[in-house]
Image: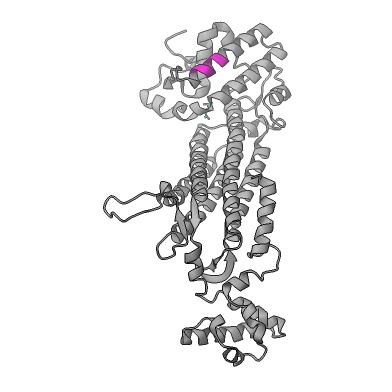
Amino acid sequence: MAKSKKSWEKRLAGEPDRLTVDFVESLSVDRRLYKYDIVGSIGHAEMLAEQKLITRAEFKEIKKALLEIAEEIADGRFKFDKTLEDIHMAIEAALVKKTGEVGKKLHTGRSRNDQVAADIRLWMRDEIETLQAKVTLLQKAFVKSAGKYAEDVMPGYTHLQRAQPIVIAAYLLSFVEQFERDFIRLGNCRELLNISPLGSGAIAGSTLAIDRESTSRKLGFGGVSRNSIDAVSDRDFCVEFIFDCALIATHLSRLAEDWIIYSTSEFGFLSIDERYCTSSSMMPQKRNCDVLELIRGKTARVYGSLLGMLTVLKGQPTGYNRDLQEDKVHIFAASDTVSQSLDVARAVVAGSRFNRKKISASLDEGFLDATALAEYLVVKGVAFRDAHGIVGSLVAYCEKQGKKLAELGLDELRRYSASIKKDVYESIGAANVAGRYITEGAAGPGEAKKQIAYWQKRLGR
Ligand code: ARG
């Protein structure tokens, strides 16, 4: 062989320019696929042996060498050479170095185009399981915390204005729901991506008797792709995966925003474990929850990856194009960011305390019980729209008097509606109201406890 390390360079006039080498290489990014590349190659080689395209002895030699290479990469002994472009070529070159003529047979009936498509799918399958496990741990942290605050009432907000009383547990469990959908979405993504593109070759398949079902089975795929042209260029699953990550990031950012606000001295609802806080280089009194701000901030990266991935695909001509190599930058960035944010969020949730005293001290601010008073009137036979108006007027009156609804005397209340009776005081006051919700899924203690029991059973403690 000439100076060139790559067989296909026989087609080209000489060595590529240094600019080209640096520009086209993906080894710095895709080396983390090495395990999947090796597993995929072993499956492919075994199939080649079954099909008598190589001998059983050759397969064994290839397998042994590939496993050695995996070990060398795992313990940092492997020398990555970016002139080899990507992890697929790096491993193949090492294989040929170890086994000579035998190694040269591995790429029979295969292209890097179907190879990389398979590798990404194998990687993503595992990555999804890891992310799902992290989502579950975060959910468990929420459920555990909810168990401590099943009876404690806090204001529920709409438009970030005090709305109706809720128990803290119900608030916490609202996040468990969001992350449950994320968990399911990831599972759906895994299900859909789990098909084998191997055997599709560069675009058109092969004239050799490649047994696609066999490699698919060996690699744990649920089936083989139907169309070779689509199989080498399909990255829809990458978009879906990043979208799922983006929605996790969205949910995390909402949590982060709430808790940044709740832990201010203005709110004082929440104390976040100081291990997750930082201070200021100038202001000695500061205790900032920078990790939450960064969870919020890093969401941008994931959204960026989503748009990046979509844009890589937009307008590509049919078939494999090298643009697709950029997929990995985006799927890795999205996954790494979300993975780290999930870990941090779990730690923050597990290490935070709600300040019951502070929350309950201001619970009767903001007329959280106004809606419940209107509903009281409905029970007494007043049409809701009229009840709404009556309570609106009562609230305006209270504001003028500097009073809360529950502080009004019965005579004052009855000036606005004769339907109000002595029993009204059981139906107003934020703490009373939270205990009176009866609809399924409501934010009171009874329903929250049911949900806690449901999640404990579903997720395990
Ligand atoms: N490094 C490439 C990628 O990640 C592998 C496929 C390259 N194929 C090709 N014909 N140039 O997409």
- Vertical side of 179 occupied by 265: above or below: below
Residue 333 horizontal/vertical position (percent)? 48, 39
Residue 444 horizontal/vertical position (percent)? 64, 65
Residues drawn in magenta: 67-72
Q: Quadrant of residue 151?
A: bottom right
- Vertical side of 187 occupied by 247: above or below: below
Q: Which residue is drawn at 49% across and 55% down?
A: 353
Q: In which quarter of the image is residue 420?
A: bottom right
In the image: residue 387, left or right of residue 84: right
Q: Residue at x 69, y 26 (%)?
A: 216
Q: Nearer the viewer, residue 274 or 161?
A: 274
In the image: residue 368, left or right of residue 50: left
Q: Residue at x 31, y 51 (%)?
A: 280
- Vertical side of 443 occupied by 225: above or below: above
Residue 99 horizontal/vertical position (percent)? 55, 7
Q: Does the magenta stretch include residue 454?
A: no
